Amino acid sequence: MGAGRVIFVSAGPGAADLITVRGARALGTADIVLADALADPALRDLAPQAQWVLVGKRGYEHSAKQTEINALLLKATQEHAVVVRLKGGDASIFGRLEEELVALAEAGVASEVIPGVTAAFAAAAHAQRPLTRRGRGRNVSLTTAMTETGELRAALSADTEVFYMAGRQLATLGAKLIVAGWPADTLALVVSRAGCADAITSEHSIATLADAAPLHGNCPTVVTVGTGAAPVQGQPHLTPASKIVVSPEQAPLTTQSRS
């Protein structure tokens, strides 16, 4: 068989029903699905005819792992007409999409990217705290808290900063933010397992951000700092140990959530 085509499908964060309609339809056409670790296993129901291969990694793993994924992707296109590369969240946001697009382009393989919901948006929706606010929240920065070299980075570059992959960095992120220029009493909203029915949300100042570590543990965690972390008018502040509970009527229609 000649080279097939690749569809990058953004699964969204957490629950399976956060995938877009277009993404769900693409899954339904797949001959093989190469899936990331954080994609909800319930999404398999959308591609019952497809071979399903788990290839994802969590955070930054050794570069050879990405090379292996690229090789598997290219091999799949030689054996199948439609290859779906299923990525958690939005494929373009900290999803190592560039490396895979380069590998396909160099091999002359056609591809398509279907956008999706990223964890920052799911966290904002869960806490009902908009990332932008009229007149005072004009820009948002999405930042990875951990670089490939293991260096923790923090910045003051927007009215609202959202830090991804921050679960293991909560104890030191606050100090880094203060060094970057944020006032110590700046509000920080921490959401782990964003997009899942059991998401946990807590509120802190950046000076006390370390207090979030026992609550959120090593779960997939995003930290929103600045304007977008503040409650809207009429909403209460959260205590450091608060957990926003989703009612059964509001819970996503899925039997499994991401690990």
Image (tube, rainbow, N blue to C red):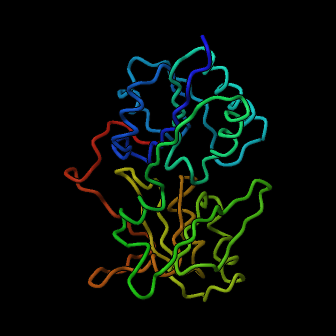
| Front residue of this view, candidates 204 and 125 | 125
| Front residue of this view, candidates 69 and 80 | 80
Q: Residue at x 57, y 79 (%)?
A: 158
Q: Quadrant of residue 144 in the image?
A: bottom right
Return the x and y of residue 105 as percentages of the image width and height.
68, 35
Q: What is the tally of numbered marks visible in this picture?
A: 0
Q: Is residue 174 above or below residue 221?
A: below
| Front residue of this view, candidates 56 and 258 | 56
Relative side of 133 to 172, left or right? left
Relative side of 102 to 137, left or right? right
What residue occupies the far top of the structure in this picture? 1
Relative side of 120 to 197, left or right? right
Return the x and y of residue 28 as percentages of the image width and height.
38, 26
Q: Residue at x 68, y 29 (%)?
A: 108
Relative side of 117 to 104, left or right? left
Q: Residue at x 67, y 86 (%)?
A: 181
Q: Quadrant of residue 239 in the image?
A: bottom left
